[in-house]
Amino acid sequence: MENNIVVGLDIGTTKIAALIAVLNGKEINLIGVGNYPSVGLKRGMVVNIEHTVESIRKAINQAELMAGVTVDSVYVGIAGDHVRGINSHAVVAVGRDDHEITEDDVRRAIDAAKAITMPMDREIIHVIPQEFIVDTQEGIRNPIGLTGTRLEVEAHVVTGAVASAQNIFRCVTRAGYKVKDLVLEPLASSYAVLDREEQELGVTLIDIGGGTTDIAMFFDGSIRATDMLGLAGQQVSNDISICLKTPYDKAEELKKTYGCAMGSLVDESEMIEIPVVGGRAPRQIQKKYLAKIVEARMDEIFNLVLYSMQNNKMYNLMNAGVVLTGGGSLLEGSVELAMEIFKMPVRIGYPRGFGGLMDAASNPIYATGIGLIHYGIQKNKLKVHEDFENVDEPSDEDTGEQRASHTDALNEQSLTGEYQGKLYGKITDRMKKWLDEFF
């Protein structure tokens, strides 16, 4: 059973969620959920090591007690406004004399795509192929076995601040767990909340967390653009706290209980009770006034997302619309406000594709954690070595389905850190070296 256990760890600004799942054949059963307040992060970046380490331990311990298992390694999400995504293009010559494209050609093309100029304090997190071009033929997802003299790749390169990634790695390690992979959070969330058809048609995933709002645009089955905003649920709660002169924790409760992202949906006659400081008696206000505070900030967040989307050439290809997830998507009226601003279909993305403790985790706040589990399971199914040396070439007797499975595995290889070899192993090696020097 231990070999089939996968753990997703979502280290967020307001909460740390740990989810434990076991793979039984093709069925994914969630067996443990842990959720603990996060007090050591700001906008996705660690600002207090000790607090973060303690929160990680307690979240995972909760999940372990529920699952009745002991965890030793986790898949960890990474986000924050330090994360940047750019598109890269690379060209290599096909190596074999007979011009048949091999795994080595694909590896060299992906490796060339990461040769981008960036500051010394940044590192590559993911190199995600979008499509391959063989000679002049475009739109190829798996070029292995095709014949050509020139192989090109269009890839999305995600980079992050080295120090921020190191701090997350260090916190998890000091808590007593091994980091199996660092995964971009909106990429992880997409595994849990997006349909394949949506990704093919064109969809934008907006993950509204506590400290950041993560944006990922998909088209033709691949991620095409990513962006991060340093505005999210915390700013909404802070606005409520300031405008209503109530403590921040009470403002957070008011947001979750009575908050509405669209004032026109609220009955003007409805009144709510506002806690105040100094031991004074609570006062009453119109619920509509609270809604106006929430709407102002959510309107700003959605308009900043829209600006980011419009600055990308993929914007006009978002035919499936927008999917909202994360805690901020649960605000009443968030879908209606988003539809008004984006002028396209909008739905809330609930995590799916698992059994077991469905009632405990069928909530957008667990989208990243469930997505990390899906990511880890898909990664473990791959039969690809870090540097492609152990990939079995399909034989002539293989069926078309088997060959497709083989090439799909190679393509998915580029989406995983541990199996990317040089592409993503570099950051892990640097972290380990840094930790060894520190301790």
Image: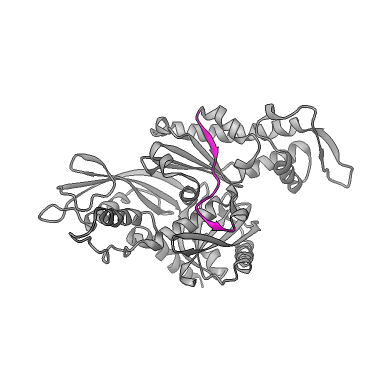
Locate residue 252, reporting x and y percent.
71, 45
Locate residue 232, reporting x and y percent.
60, 42
Given residues 161 and 87, the one toward you in this image is 87
Query: Does 169 appear above or below 337?
Result: below
Query: Is residue 136 one of those drawn in magenta?
Result: no
Dominant SS in magenta: loop
Can residue 163 be seen at all in this image of the molecule? no
Residue at figure coordinates x 66%, y 30% from the top left: 262
Given residues 309 and 204, the one toward you in this image is 204
Locate residue 317, reporting x and y percent.
40, 32
Colouring mode (rainbow / by chain / secondary structure / one colour): one colour
Instruction: Please give left or right for residue 238 compared with residue 164 in the image.
Output: right
Instruction: Please give left or right for residue 257 compared with residue 387 in the image.
Output: right
Query: Does 265 appear above or below 56?
Result: above
Instruction: Please give left or right for residue 216 compared with residue 274 in the image.
Output: left
Q: Farthest residue in the left direction?
A: 97
What is the total number of numbered labels drawn onto the structure image?
A: 0
What's drawn in magenta, residue-wise?
344-357
Locate residue 152, reporting x and y percent.
24, 45
Residue at figure coordinates x 45%, y 31% from the top left: 310
Residue at figure coordinates x 74%, y 30% from the top left: 288
Can residue 439 be seen at all in this image of the molecule? yes
Query: Is residue 354 one of those drawn in magenta?
Result: yes
Residue at figure coordinates x 75%, y 31% from the top left: 289
